[in-house]
Image (tube, helix red, strand yellow):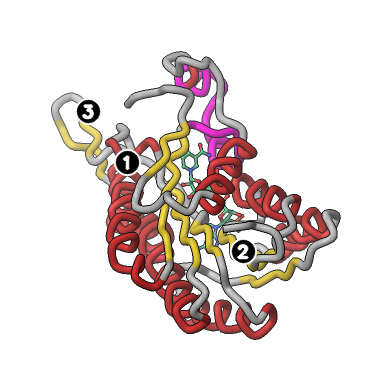
Amino acid sequence: MQVQSKTVVITGAGRGIGRSLASQFAQRGANLALLDLNAADLAESRALCEAHGVEARCYPADVSAEQQVIGAMDAIVHDFGRFDVIVNNAGIVNDSLLIKVKDGVVSDRMSLRQWQAVVDVNLTGVFLCGREAAAHMVKFGAGGVIINISSISRHGNIGQTNYAATKAGVAAMTVVWAKELARYGIRAGAIAPGFTNTEILSGMRPEVLQKVIAPVPLRRLGDPAEIAHAALFIVENDFFTGRCIDLDGGLRL
Ligand code: NAP
């Protein structure tokens, strides 16, 4: 699929990887529908896109709230008159060990709240946005591309029971959608970034960050622009579907 003049929807577009995705798709001539919780961040991303001479609009919404997702997707279709690509990028972390044990006694455990918060955004959010996107794409009859942002953590990262489970789920949904939606000309792909330089890592102390980087063969964090580059590849390569691109500097968990 050519990117030029297509309508590309990006969730979590207010900062980090989502903002970089928005900017790179804009650079290639796509029109952008930007979805995020934070309206002020969205406005900044919109200005970045508009600097490339394309149309960009903001849709403040929570990807885990069904009616908000349906409302935002309907508004996008109304405003742009087409729906070609969605990148399901919005995601959160809320890390802790499954149980903490001190002197042989269980002192803490991952709460149901922590579990549910991450499942709601990372898994239910992708499900809802992917479902609505697919329905609109089928209605227009022009095919489309759905990209889900998974993570290297889907292989099982310590302290991330909730996050790893959602990111494995996202990769699995991608395979299902590739099989179910191919008959409508819709492709589905996933990208699994390794540690990438965004605010999601801001909670890490510098010494912890150094420990994270040390086993990466390329000895650095990924750049959000490198993740966006993979998304452009998925859109432009019409033989790509049902697979997940690992983009992690060679790190294996
Ligand atoms: P980020 O800097 O924290 O940005 C995430 C964006 O998603 C924020 O703008 C956030 O809005 C938005 N968001 C959060 N919850 C939302 C919701 N319920 N509805 C709508 N928007 C919501 O994170 P990032 O590093 O760019 O991560 C982007 C994606 O890549 C995530 O799916 C993440 O899991 C994945 N990933 C990141 C890394 C990494 O190392 N950075 C590695 C692997 C995978 P607010 O600002 O309002 O919270």
Mark 1 and mark 3: Cα distance apart in space: 28 Å
Q: Residue at x 44, y 54 (%)?
A: 148
* Residue count near mark 3 (Cα–Cα under 10 Å), binned few <14, some 14–19, many ≥20: few
Residue of label 1: 154
Identify the residue under disc 2. 8
Q: Which residues are magenta?
A: 195-212
Contact flag, marks 1 and 3 (Cβ < 8 Å): no
Q: Which amino acid, mark 2?
A: Val
Residue 51, compared with residue 16, is above or below; it is below
Distance of mark 2 from mark 3, alpha carbons?
Answer: 49 Å
Classed neighbour count for the residue bearing mark 1: other residues with Cα under 10 Å, few (<14), some (14–19), many (≥20): many
Q: Is 196 contained in the magenta span?
A: yes
What's under tag 3, amino acid-wise?
A: Lys
* Mark 3: secondary structure: strand
Q: Residue 197's x, y, as percent?
A: 60, 33
The image shows residue 63, relative to residue 22, as above or below, that is below
Residue 107 in the magenta stretch? The answer is no
| Residue 193, placed above or below residue 207 | below
Q: What x and y, as percent, mark residue 246? A: 41, 35
- Residue labelled with disc 3: 102
Would residue 152 appear left or right of 225 to someone viewing this image?
left
Can you say which quadrant of the picture contains the N terminus?
bottom right
The quadrant of the rendering that contains the C terminus is top left
Secondary structure at numbered mark 1: helix
